[in-house]
Image (cartoon, rainbow, N blue to C red):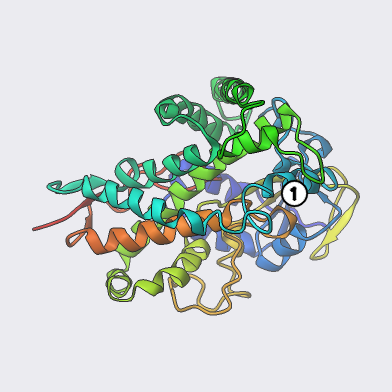
Amino acid sequence: MTTTQTPDTLRRILDYSSRADPYPLYAELRETPVARQEDGSFVISTYREISDILHNPHLSSDTRNLSCPTAGMQAEGTPAFINLDPPEHDRLRRLAMRHFGPPHTPGLVTGMEGALTTAVGNLIDDFAGKQRIDVVDDFAYPFPVAVICHLLGVPREDEPRFHRWVDDLINSIDYNPKTDPKEKLDKGVQARKDLRQYLGGLLAQRHGHPGDDLLSRLANDDGPDGRMTDEEIVATANLLLIAGHETTVNLITNGMLTLLRHPHVLQRLCEEPDLVVPLVEELLRYEPPVHIIPWRAAYSDITVAGTTIPKGAQIMLMLASGSRDPNRFHDPDRFDPDRRDNQHLGFGSGIHLCFGGPLARREAQIALGQLVRHLDRPRLVADPPPYRRSPVLRGPIHLYVEQGAA
């Protein structure tokens, strides 16, 4: 059985007017867990079905397996491993993980604790004497950008250049040829080229000159799987540079917004610093930085919740909807840092589970834990705040907060 759903709900979710609160629309979507759209794509919105898809070996993350890829899905150059399937995905992920986390570098994140805490403290020190701050521009953006630049070996002074490229890339992710100007796609395509060329230039300087940064390690290390090609290294660095700060910016900003909307939880966090660990997990469920995985494709016809999805059809996974599914989470629209059994979809699941999740978690824990203790009676200037355009990576573009005497 194939259920066709009116595209109106999805269209309203993707429309910018719904960015501040898409959750009632997600509830509408969940009434039809697997719904065929008019263009032949399928939207999956419930927890169980999303989880099953993410663990299904018959599903592809490679857009080249889509029957009708749109212009916005066309990759420039070698795809990052997140957009590849086994065995190539597994090989490249192993090569990257040798230098980014367990089991080969288990102390990477914990070894950065001091530097992360110092970086956050320096940003907070700059708030002294300011009655109004922008949590995004003054805090949530510069912190993870500094971290990922340090890890990759990207000069911090080049940040304004790749900030512009990343913005254009993110804006082009949800390009719709029927409704969006072609300029949106063209900017994204050019940004991909410019960013890859820039990273390629940095990589060329690392060959034969081993260092502690990730680019140097990838360029000079021979492990059991050999080395990545230059194109594969650039694709991996491109992924880390974008995902390594865009998602964390949203996680920290969404977190501060949620705490300001729940002052009793904010006060608890001030008094119970250890609460920050489960609190960040609840944020990843309740207000995640990534709302949608825009595409998967089936290698062959598959059946999900009684609905037949044909080979090559585009599948859109609504992660944020799944994490608010009342069939999986009790009282899902309530923010509850004491929630147990919180196996959210905030970082995805399966073989493509977020590569940088452990680092993003720790960044958010340190950032939010220190911020709430140092702001003086913080209060929102505008609620809802202005949001970024993207429905995929969702978060405020600015979050103005006043502190001190009202």
Residue 100, position as x, y percentages in the image:
62, 49
Residue 201 seen from this side? yes
Residue 174 seen from this side? no
Q: Identify which residue is drawn at 58% across, 44% down.
A: 11
SS at badge 1: helix
Q: Identify which residue is drawn at 17% across, 60% down.
A: 376
Q: Identify which residue is drawn at 91% across, 49% down.
A: 300
Q: Quadrant of the C terminus?
A: bottom left
Q: Quadrant of residue 210?
A: top right
Farthest residue, direction right: 300
Q: Circle 1: is it few (<14), some (14-19), or many (20+) Cα within 10 Å?
A: some
Q: Amino acid at mark 1?
A: Arg
Residue 19, position as x, y percentages in the image:
45, 48
Residue 178, position as x, y percentages in the image:
62, 29
**In the figure, is residue 369 to the left or right of 46?**
left
Residue 131, position as x, y percentages in the image:
14, 49
Residue in the foreground of this view, choosing between 6 and 188:
188
For residue 284, above or below residue 18: below
Q: Identify which residue is drawn at 61% across, 63% down.
A: 322
For residue 310, above or below residue 158: below
